[in-house]
Image (cartoon, rainbow, N blue to C red):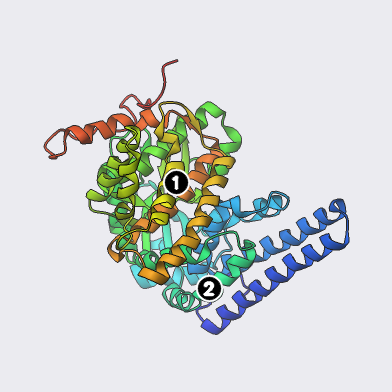
Amino acid sequence: MDEASKPSASRLGRTYRLARLATDASARVALGMAKKAVGSEEEARPRSLEEHRRIARRAVEILGGMKGLAMKAGQIVSYVDDWIPEDVRPAYAELLPTLQAKAPKVPLADMLNVFIDEVGEPPDEVFRSFDEEPIAAASIGQVYRAELPDGRPVAVKIQYPGIDEVIRSDLKNLGLLETVLRASTMGRFDVKQSLEDIKLKIGEELDYRREAANQRRFAEIYADHPRIVVPRVYDEYSHARVLTTELLGGRSYYEFIAASDQEEKNRTAETLYEFVFGSFHRHGIFNADPHPGNYVFLGDARVGFLDFGCVQEFPLEVPGNFRRLVQLLWAGRVDEVREGLPAALGYPGEASEEEKDFFLDYVGYLWRPILEDRSFTYDEAFVKEIFSNTKRGVKLSAKLTLTKGMPDTERRGLALLNRLQFGFVSILAGLRATSNWHRLIRDYFAYHTENQDGGGPPPPPLIAPEGEARGEEPA
């Protein structure tokens, strides 16, 4: 069985593979730099590009084959690509997206053993039909197309055999995994904090019954929404390691980008925005895994949302605090925002003046699309600037941790929210999404201000019933 098949749970074996990848990545980067030093720019660039192609190819092979925490971390790096220097970005753009939906497959026989252990029967005795070739491979499971006895098409997600042991091994290897990703990203991505965030949540993803409950909740919230589609969960065909849901047919993120004009991309981006920020501000919940493989584009600005294993929930006071801070910025009361941000972000104790300045500068840029009543385009330059500010925050965070300890553990999910926003901004930038985002949420914020006692009618959706975004400007 090769490296790209059944995930090994042996810590020694996984440590060896990570160490080999770290050494290989670092060595190839160094080799490219050496070639550049002794040759001309014209000669160095193609050779450097080829070296980076080899790094990317090796990362996909090893991280994808290892599954678990290693693959999850690789997926994050694969869609937040602004850490990659422009001169070698094509090497990674060609290969890393395969970690999002087409990672190396585990043999069918191994997956069927898990199914039989959970269900008690093989798939061909449970379903009318069951395709042997997986349609998607995720960090802890593989997805197959099947039909219920009545003919309805479904997606059957089966957990990888021994993935719980794999994840325990990866958690012990966090330091080495950090080295691998830091080498692969040339030190330009905050992998340490991202791995800590993933560590806190990935254990919950091992129980598909929890994911099913999360998905049912989102499906209930958006049951009558004109653009947001959450696949139905079939409980009678779902178990702790097998999850059966409605199968959605549509385009992938990259297929959608290639096939759609800008107007359709803009309208669809508003649907994505509604799901992400509407869920947080209305219900205090969000799906903390916004990589492109979790979206199915259904046409006419409709989007299907997949994979609810990593869902974070907050008391409603948390989105309420952010809402009030945005409204204060709209009113020009910047000093009040500066004083209120540290507590809203869950940081412990009294923030220093340096910390307050950084928080204000950071959210001021992150929230720039909604601060003014005008159209705004999410693009690569915007993401790069956020990334640059984030690197400043990494240094400040290290200083804070050493002097005050980690942020409030009850609000550690705020770090995941930050990851969500950064990853989601990258997805919107891939679409070059343009809208008046300020108008899109202004009416919703006003509703909460007028109904603070909770006794008013339910808040309106950001997307109006007829399917047009409330934030759209008149033609």
> Percent position (x, y) of residue 19?
62, 77
Question: Which residue lies most toward the front here?
Answer: 353
Question: Which residue lies most toward the bottom here?
Answer: 12
- Residue 307 in view: no
Q: Which residue is mark 2?
A: 7
Relative height, residue 269 to residue 286 (above, below): above
Q: Quadrant of residue 373?
A: top left
> Percent position (x, y) of residue 112?
45, 68
Residue at (48, 39) in percent of width and height: 297
Question: Which residue lies most toward the top here?
Answer: 475
Q: Which residue is mark 1?
A: 361
Question: Closer to the observer: label 2 or label 1?
Answer: 1
195 or 357: nearer the eye? 357
Residue at (57, 55) in percent of width and height: 78
Q: Mark 2: which amino acid?
A: Pro
411 or 402: nearer the eye? 402
Residue at (73, 71) in percent of width and height: 27
Task: Give SS at disc 1.
Answer: helix
